[in-house]
Amino acid sequence: MPAQAKEKAARTYAQEDLDQVFHEFDSGQSGLSSKQAISRLKHFGANTIQKTQQEAQWKIFLKNFTSLMAILLWVSGVIAIVSGTLELGIAIWCVNIINGCFSYYQQHEAQKATDSMLAMLPTYTEVYRDNKLQQLDSKNLVPGDVFMLTAGDAIPVDARILQATSLQVDESALTGESVPESKEEKYAPGEGQFAETNMVYAGTSVVNGTCSCLTIATGMNTEFGKIAQLTHAQKKVASPLQIELNRLTRQLSIIAFGIGAAFFLASILFVHYAPAKAFIFALGMIVAFIPEGLLPTVTLSLAQGVKRMAKKHALVKELNSIETLGEATVICSDKTGTLTQNQMTVNHIWTKANTYTVSGQGYAVNGKVQLNDQDVAYKDYPDLKQALLISTLDNEAKIQADPKNPGQQKIVGTPTERALMVTALKAGFDIEAALKAQPRLQECPFDSQRKRMTTIHPATNGQKLVLVKGALDGMLPLCDQIQTDGKQQEITDADVKQIQGANEHFAAQGWRSLALAYKVADDPQAKVSTSAAESHLIFVGLEVMSDPPRAEVYQAVQKCHDARIRIIMVTGDSALTAKSIAVKIGITGDNARVVTGDELHKMTDDELKIALSGPVIFARVAPEQKYRIVSNLQARGEVVASTGDGVNDAPALKKADIGIAMGKMGTDVAKDAADMILTDDNFASIVAAIEEGRAVYSNIQKFLLYILNSNMPEAVPSALFLFTRGAIPLPLTVMQILTVDLGTDMLPALGLGSERAEPDVMKQPPRPRKAHLLRKNIVWKAFGWYGLMASTISSFAYFYTNFQLGRTWTTLATSGPIYREATTMTLAAIVFSQIAAVLNCRTQQLSVFSIGIFSNKHVWFGIAFEIVLLAVLIYTPFLQGVFNTTGIGLREWLFLICIPIPLFLIEEYRKYLSRKLFAHRNKLYTQSAVQH
């Protein structure tokens, strides 16, 4: 049994003699026997990556009923039932139960959708067992197994390479580096982590070539699994929204119970109520000031956000994550595939005679090769023709039938080689004819030491055509001639300087250059050595390529700037490429500091915080470094959203306030750690999600404003009753107060929870972390503006009804039909005042007409519902007795219908003046800034 497999890091086996490795694992070139494999499977366990341990469903369910607000409502229901108002207690409990079930349902559905997306490791692997090559479930791989890999295979374990042919591996899931690594059976340390040339690692994939490997580590013992364990060690803290809702609940509880206690004492001292009756009266005021609809509104607002975000390619795993995303002050974003298309594209072909441009992006053949903005025929330009010949014949990419699109073809291979093939097709080069005319005789595969690939083909008169492509710095010394307009001449120092200058120019743009060269050899040998083939070459030119930014990312980045959200690129790519892309799409300017992983390793946390205070880009970072960047940003008080797709990103995703994983390219560990998954891997979807997050917070504040402003017209009648020592009869009964809070107000308030983001929401800075939901301006608007107007109108309705029915100040009705009609009109006036209030609350400063007065159908359904409910309460005989109401006539209805119109127009005018004042202040500020 290979006990060392659990005690030694897999990477330590890279430098050991292969025979020694076979001995330690009691294995050989033909692999294990079935008996050995069964024994080891029992010992080491299945080759799987454990997901973060999930809470039991019953615990998640109960959490929705044990928040501070939920507990407060449970207690309120108990008090109501004990005090004899059974209907009230049941109504409060029903609100709690419905909200809890709805919230759990949304969480459960989001989790199910997420789980269905998470595909972990490859399903089948070709493994040698009992001296036979068999197809086995990768879960059953064990240390000591020998298996085969080909292009396109995902690598299921950490393994030592036994034999390899033209092997290239995409290790971006571990390293963040988008350029594939060349691998072979011989050991070389390589550059950076996981770069040993004779090792492959779980979670990565083969993009080119074939190999046989010896399994070193499986499951959680792989490097992939170790980083997953680091992810699991991170604990999630309460979201800012959860913290703020708890604080708000405490505030409102103190206010409600304080007012209840004051009214309890006042009713005993001033009106001489019996304690039991005073308690019922005070309970009504307590319930009036507790926003029972807060949790349903928050849940609905979050759930609506989830639905809208799903349409914008963002899957949210937890409802509270939406609002937290809206608070983000910094986005730490990967480059490849998020900001860029993850599709290499050739944009220039450079020769000594000409520089050709190549249009189109990605792997679609949708562009042309041009010279001076004119299409060219490659046959008329010998150097261009030779460059295309080299890039297509000296290439491992293959054109195959596309199984997903019958009748169509696709190109399979590394991103670089696919880009070369696409460029040839854009030029009209006949690839199939070239392959038939000059089939490959021999190949010298690409490796990380030479950094080039060479192929040999038949030429005329028994000669051999040697084609070479690779890194310029290694190829240029091998060239002693250069081709210009189809003629070969000795390469001069001036030629070398010109070539290097062109390469530096392209590199400054963040582009990669691939050098192309060839020679015709008279070598009679059947096989030519690599050193002989790659000597005395004729330099042809450079093919220049890049991974282009996504088209929509420019606007998304600008939106972030407008919203005062910083974007920090954190990538495994080179510093030059990272800065070029960052500047090109507008993330930073040329003055941005670029910090490499090596430099970051030497920095103290204080030095890192200083770097984070200004424009900065991080390149070539390791997993723990990304985590460290997020941690230090949070230490500076930032709310951090961090993106990622690889297992290396998972610890940072979990540490961040919002972790955002990629749905297409993301690993299972990254998705498991994240709060949100982008189904299109697009940075623009993050910005759309931020907009939704801000809308959610804004909607909660709109709800608060709406629900609190009805407290004033509910409290003022009671205050009039108390402070006149009963001289003014109670204009609103306790049951009528509860009618407003638990009945007529609920649906319009929930309608505000579904309001879409206002057009200017991304023109505002993120709210400060210390800012609270219950702000001074909300309290002032609720009590001193909306509430004051509603109190005046409802009180007027009470007195007006008394006066119309023959009563005076000193003979106000205390019971009977006149009293019931007066209290009914008070209740109805509050309801119709709330119609204006819910429309006014739809925007903060913008005119409601600018977003469409009828655009929120949920609000209008709520308005219709409260009018119908009011009519039911005042015309149903049974309910008239319960709620102390009575029927009213046409004149009273006309009065009520007129109430919302002036209230709505007055508020529209206030918003107009507010916008004018804000614009004037902005103008003065701009003028002052220009002068200074």
Image: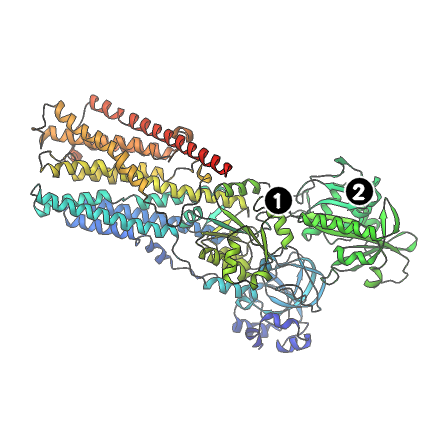
Q: Examine the rendered structure and indicate whether residue 871 appears above or below residue 101.
A: above
**Where residue 907 sits: x, y (%)?**
33, 30
**Where residue 265 sits: x, y (%)?**
12, 46
| In the image: residue 220, left or right of residue 95 | right
Report crowding for label 2: few under 14, some 14 to 19, many 20 or more residues within 10 A (C-alpha).
some
Image quarter of residue 12: bottom right
Q: Examine the rendered structure and indicate whether residue 809 appears above or below residue 289.
A: above
Q: Amino acid at mark 2?
A: Asn
| In the image: residue 56, left or right of residue 452 | left
Q: Viewer-proximal residue, 373 or 109?
A: 373
The colour scheme used to paint the residues is rainbow
Q: Earlier in the sequence, mark 1 or mark 2?
A: 2
Report crowding for label 1: few under 14, some 14 to 19, many 20 or more residues within 10 A (C-alpha).
some
For the view shown, which residue lies furthest in the right direction? Answer: 461
Image quarter of residue 298: top left
Image quarter of residue 59: bottom left
**Where residue 363 sits: x, y (%)?**
67, 45
Q: Viewer-proximal residue, 711 or 507?
A: 507
Q: For residue 132, say whether it is visible.
A: yes
| Residue at x 58%, y 58% (from the top left corner) | 173
| In the image: residue 654, left or right of residue 352 | left
Q: For residue 400, say whether it is visible.
A: no
The residue singled out by tag 1 in the image is 584
Distance Cα–Cα, label 1 vs label 2: 25 Å
* Marker disc for residue 354: 2
Q: Viewer-proximal residue, 712 or 83?
A: 712
